Amino acid sequence: MSKMTCKGYTARVEFDDRDGVFVGRVLGIKAIVGFHGTTVDELRADFKAAIDLLLDDAKARGEAPERPASGKLMLRVPPEVHAAAAIAAEAAGTSLNQWAAKVLGDAARTAPAR
């Protein structure tokens, strides 16, 4: 699996060997937004067109476009994990929120693509 981004949206891309086509799907939103292409250039162009359609449709309805994330994250963790994270944040001289954002960001950037 590979990833692509366009205008703040991320998509998973795979190659369908049977049909000889790249197939992508936008991640992190409720709407099912797919696209495809037989070449990388076609794939990129269809991805951009799919995102443009998503944004134009929301605008026509007078609504804000659906976004992959709001920036707010609620987690439920065991109390001992919460305590350990709070201590790690304090030791690093940051707030728990800043510490968690850095740790999650680092982990997300280094996570292997699936």
Image: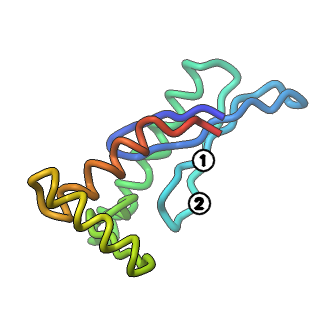
Residue at image position (90%, 30%) is 18
Q: As drawn, is 50 to the left or to the right of 73? A: right
Question: What amino acid is at disc 1?
Answer: Arg
Where is residue 46 drawn, in percent x and y? Answer: 54, 34
Residue at image position (52%, 68%) is 30
Mark 1 or mark 2, which is nearer the start of the sequence? Answer: 1
Q: Which mark is residue 25?
A: 1
Q: Secondary structure at mark 1?
A: strand
Dividing the picture into quadrants, the one containing residue 89 is: bottom left
Where is residue 21 drawn, in percent x and y? Answer: 75, 28
Q: As drawn, is 61 to the left or to the right of 15? A: left
**Do callouts 2 and 1 mark residues in contact (Cβ within 8 Å)?**
yes
Q: Which residue is mark 2?
A: 32
Q: Secondary structure at mark 2?
A: loop
In the picture, the quarter occupied by the N terminus is: top right
Dividing the picture into quadrants, the one containing residue 85 is: bottom left
**Residues packed near mark 2 inside 10 Å, few (<14), some (14 to 19) or many (20 plus):** few
Question: What amino acid is at disc 2?
Answer: Ile
Seen in the picture, residue 55 relative to 61 is either above or below; the reply is: above
